[in-house]
Image (cartoon, rainbow, N blue to C red):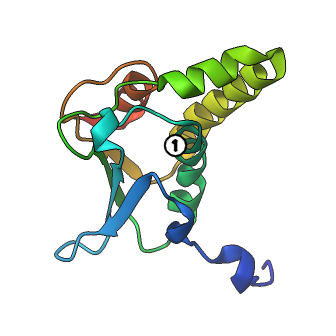
Amino acid sequence: DAPPFPDLDAVDYTKYKTIVVRRDDEQPGVLILELARPEQLNATSSRMHREVSQIWIDVARDPAVSVVVLTGQGKAFCAGGDFAMIERNMATPEALYEMYEEARSLVLNMIGCSKVIVCAINGVAVGAGCALALLGDITI
């Protein structure tokens, strides 16, 4: 038996700024993740890209979660990378490599998540948004 490390085992969703995390009041085992840049059709900023690659680690460790519903706020699921992020990533080979590594982590962490992931596609899903949509266990 591994010793408990409450500080390391704690799941803290408050660090996410571009993803709204909430629990369903009627179904406490359901965690709802909303991509939260509706004015930009939920296009992924550098921060959102990092968050969406890391949140699956927290979700997998959260004992209260059985099912995750991933959706976008507003009229789009995710319009892909925003131009500022694309420009930053194209500026240097190192930045491009970092973005590729995050994209790789997004795929591996989402696939490796032990919870059922339902992607509720509520509009366009382009680029990274298309990848997110297709990586869910169930896509509707």
- Of residues 28 and 55, the one nearer the viewer is 55
Say which residue label 1 marks. Answer: 48
As displayed, is residue 22 above or below residue 106? below
The quadrant in which the C terminus is found is: top left
Q: Does residue 19 lie above or below 93 as drawn? A: below
Which residue is at 57% across, 72% downward? 11
Other residues around mark 1 within 10 Å, as few (<14) / some (14–19) / many (≥20) = many
Depth check: 123 or 68 in front? 123
Position of residue 114 measured from the top left corner of the image (x, y, whole percent): 50, 52
Q: Tell me what residue is drawn at x 42 percent, y 53 percent.
A: 19
As helix, strand or loop, the secondary structure at mark 1 comes to helix
- On-image quarter of the N terminus: bottom right
Q: Is residue 24 left or right of residue 83?
A: left
Nearer to us in this view, 72 or 3: 72
For the point 47% across and 34% down, which residue is it? Answer: 44
User: Horizontally, is 22 left or right of 16 in the view?
Assistant: left
Quarter residue 66 falls in: bottom left
Residue 126, picture quadrant? top left
The percent position of residue 110, horizontal first and vertical second, equals 52, 41
Q: Percent from the top left, x then y, of residue 52?
A: 52, 44
- Left or right: where 118 falls relative to 1: left
| Residue nearest the viewer, comparing 112 with 82 | 82
Q: Amino acid at mark 1?
A: Met
In the displayed structure, 108 sits above or below 92; it is: below
